[in-house]
Amino acid sequence: MRTLVLNAGYEPLAVVSFKRAIVLVMNEKATVVEHVVGDPVWGTSGSYDRPAVIILTRYVRVPGGRHVPVTRRGVLRRDGHRCAYCGKAASTIDHVQPRSRGGKDTWENLVACCLRCNNVKGDRTPQEMSWSLRLTPAPPRGAQWTVRGTERADPRWEPYLALAA
């Protein structure tokens, strides 16, 4: 069971285990906004409802601009596991501007690619191959990218994640 943690300003921060959420609530660092009905946690001093959403009592300043790091898994997820050149199922990533020609590992230069297209393209650019990209690579946006762990979001979290988008 996972719990959504909201900042004091209702900004989604992270998804934690229900055990961590209960510790935050018991230490009065958070309060329960919504809980799971009918599945309590038993402790030595009584039973507690499992929190589904908690809000921190004090505002936590998040350093930086919530930059989403570039990962292979992230690129595949952003592109829907579809090849940027032919549209088939993608299992690899490709540098639009090849690394051998100064291409960097950035969201704007990486796309999901099937193995066949990746091998055929090699270290050439799409223009040299007379290929076109089916999408324009860009950094991902939205609450599911900035809040760690919301890939498998609980339906109870939807109103809270919508506030951040």
Image (tube, grey):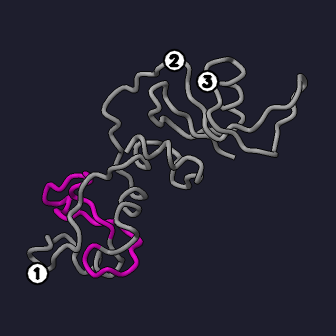
Q: Which amino acid does label 1 sit on?
A: Ser
Front-lying residue, 21 or 74: 21
Among numbered discs 3 and 2, the one appearing first in the sequence: 3
Residue 56 screen position, x and y as percent: 55, 24
Figure quadrant of residue 100: bottom left
The segment highlighted magenta reads 84-112
Instruction: State the SS at label 3.
Output: strand
Residue at which label 1 appears: 130
Residue 4 appears left or right of 78? right
Residue 28 screen position, x and y as percent: 66, 17
- Label 1 crowding class (10 Å Cα cut-off): few <14, some 14-19, many 20+? few
Label the magenta part by its dominant secondary structure: loop
Q: Residue drawn at (36%, 49%), measured in percent from left and top?
A: 142
Residue at which label 3 appears: 30
Front-lying residue, 60 or 98: 60
When the figure is inspected, residue 163 is found, relative to residue 26, above or below; the finding is: below
Q: Which mark is residue 86?
A: none
Residue at which label 2 appears: 58
* Whether label 2 touches label 1, CB < 8 Å: no
Q: Residue drawn at (22%, 76%), measured in percent from left and top?
A: 121
Q: What residue type is labelled 2?
A: Arg
Q: Residue drawn at (49%, 24%), measured in percent from left and top?
A: 8
Among numbered discs 2 and 1, the one appearing first in the sequence: 2
Q: Which amino acid does label 3 sit on?
A: Ala
The stretch drawn in magenta includes residue 89: yes
Among numbered discs 3 and 1, the one appearing first in the sequence: 3
Q: Quadrant of the C terminus?
A: top left
Front-lying residue, 69 or 138: 138
- Label 3 crowding class (10 Å Cα cut-off): few <14, some 14-19, many 20+? many
Front-lying residue, 101 or 25: 25
